[in-house]
Amino acid sequence: MVTATNTGLSEAAEVKAPHGVGLAQLILGIGGLFMGTGEFAAMGLLPDFARSVHVSIPDAGHLISAYALGVVIGSPLVAIATARMDRRRLLILLGLMIFVGNIATAFAPTFGTLSIARFLAGLPHGAYYGTASIMAAAMVPQRQRAQAIGRVMLGLALANVIGVPLTTFIGQHFGWRAAFAGIGAGGALLALLIPFTVPSLAAHKDASPTRELSAFRNVQVWLTLATAAVGFAGMFAVYTYITPTLIQVSGIALGRVPLFLGLLGLGMVVGNIIGGWLTDKAQSLTIAGVQLWNLAFFCLFAVAAYSVIGVAIVLFFIGIGFAAVPALQARLMDVAPHAQSLAAAMNHSAFNLSNALGAWAGGLAIAYGWGFASTGYVAAAFAVVGLAFFLTALLTEHRGRHQTQGQRLKGV
């Protein structure tokens, strides 16, 4: 049974999916797959973008930034603007936004219009994962909530294993526009399937933009977002430069690089599943433990990068660090019970900031002549800072709880 306390949204005693929880979560996860593929596919098809709109590859890189900007801006705006909307209707709307953004990408004739299209495609990103996580959690008992969130996030992890290789193949054989048209069609399919598979979940009776904005007054929200933005930047410091690292440091042929990227993606899938299970058992220990895990394997990456076998093993274990994603998503929903939509969506703004931060810091280390393998040490430093933010969150949370108990005792 899921109560209003569990969901923070609905006063219904129980939320039942029309055709079972399994099918509903599958559809939500597939939506995450389409969304994640739309984000990551652009990285693999960047040279094709550049040739098509007649710009250099570095200039085409601004298209990645345009999407990230859409995520950062869209996450809070969509959550605030739709605060009173039924969650199922919102998911349908977000599916249509996925369709519009990616179809616009497929038909954009110039660099300027393509930049706008990529910005539009990023707008529903955070709101989709946030809303889908809330919906998934509302359909299961409290003790299984993080695992349900993990099944939604599994779509994001699988985007690296299934979605990106598939769209890269389509792009190479039929053109990058066909690849994004396919992603757009996936958004339309999602909008069609949600009404028949996902239950209605009314917004809380007191829901309002002001109520959602209250999340920004919560120090625990900011500290958790900082944990995500900084702690996860390490993975992007490594991931952004993984192809030249594998080729120039590990001595791997270009044609074999996708196999090693697949190991990283497989690790993300495993980590996502494990992370959801562990979070339901011990949320705080999971988040802290993953930061320590990342610290160890990022340091090992800097050494293992010189070995083909070593780098293959370490990349898989680095991918397992994705276990922090469902854990952080669940924590944000806990620390902002009256503004779950905004808090959950902002998690993905934080991850996009971590993308930019990690890529910048990793590039800086390489530019200073420390070598591609040095991104492992850069990543390890981010893991240390991310852990520090989270320990600060736990300390302030403990102090706040202690002060509250003391005030209650005095009142007695």
Image: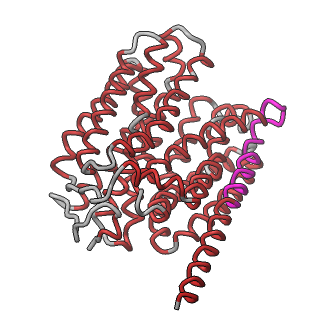
Residue 190 in percent (x, y) is at 25, 40
- Find out whether residue 385 is within the magenta segment: yes
- Find out whether residue 377 is within the magenta segment: yes
Q: Quadrant of residue 372?
A: top right
Q: Residue furthest bottom?
A: 412
In percent of the image, x 22 and y 64: which residue is there?
Answer: 15
Name the colour scheme.
secondary structure
Of residues 365 and 113, the one drawn nearer to the viewer in this rendering: 113
For residue 147, side relative to residue 97 (left or right): right
Q: Residue furthest right?
A: 369
Magenta part, dominant SS: helix
Asked if residue 360 is positioned above or below residue 54 in the image, the reply reads: below
Asked if residue 105 is positioned above or below residue 135 in the image, the reply reads: above
Q: Is residue 226 visible?
A: yes
Of residues 159 and 382, the one drawn nearer to the viewer in this rendering: 382
Q: Number of numbered discs present?
A: 0
Q: Is residue 317 visible?
A: no
In percent of the image, x 66 and y 56: which residue is there?
Answer: 294
Residue 254 in percent (x, y) is at 61, 29
Provide the residue span drawn in magenta.
366-388
Asked if residue 149 is positioned above or below residue 39 in the image, the reply reads: below
For residue 316, side relative to residue 12 (left or right): right
For residue 397, side relative to residue 336 (left or right): right
In percent of the image, x 58 and y 88: which residue is there?
Answer: 410
Q: Quadrant of residue 386?
A: bottom right
For residue 195, side relative to residue 55 (left or right): left
